[in-house]
Amino acid sequence: MTLLKQIIDKCNEGGPFFTYPILILLFVIIGVFIYDLIKKTDYGKTISLIAHLGWFAVAWGFWGRTIGLIDAFDSVEAYGEITIGALASGFKIALLNPVFGIFVFLVARAGIIVLTLMQRKKAE
């Protein structure tokens, strides 16, 4: 199975409404970072933008998890008893969005570190 297929499967498994916006945020963060490296514009504004986008990815992921858990518990309530496997599967799916959001946040933080170092180097 190719890496792209695995990523698409996980995005669909975690709920497209929450995972695809996080994926788009990842691409936007990378794009803004690369654009600023090439243009060497005002790093301060870019650092602030990337920080906000990274935090939004985390918040969106945790919001997706919360909505997913509410839906899962509604299903448990409606069906009564469920198997341990079904419960474990639901918890796994509930964790995909926050993990993906945290990954995007870490990518954003790494970009901020690089831009901060370049900003300091430019100031010297």
Image (cartoon, rainbow, N blue to C red):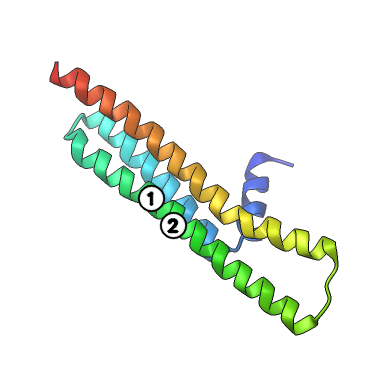
Work out which residue is located at the far top of the displayed protein and give it: 124
At 62% from the left and 44% from the top, the residue drawn is 4
At 69% from the left and 40% from the top, the residue drawn is 2
Q: Dividing the picture into quarters, in which one does residue 50 lie?
A: top left
At 54% from the left and 53% from the top, the residue drawn is 98
Q: Quarter of the image for the N terminus: give it.
A: top right
- Disc 2: CA contacts within 10 A as few (<14), some (14-19) or many (>=20): some
- Disc 1: CA contacts within 10 A as few (<14), some (14-19) or many (>=20): some
Q: Is mark 2 on a helix, strand or loop?
A: helix
The residue wearing badge 1 is 55
User: Where residue 54 sits in the image (x, y, percent)?
Assistant: 39, 47
Residue 59 is labelled as: 2
Q: What element carries label 1?
A: helix
Q: Give the CA separation, mark 2 to mark 1.
A: 6 Å
User: Contact (CB < 8 A) between labels 2 and 1?
Assistant: yes
Q: What residue type is labelled 1?
A: Trp
User: Where residue 40 sits in the image (x, y, percent)?
Assistant: 20, 29
User: Where residue 60 sits in the image (x, y, percent)?
Assistant: 46, 59
Q: Which amino acid does label 2 sit on?
A: Ala
Query: In the figure, is residue 69 to the left or right of 49?
Result: right
Using the image, determine if residue 41 lies above or below residue 85. above
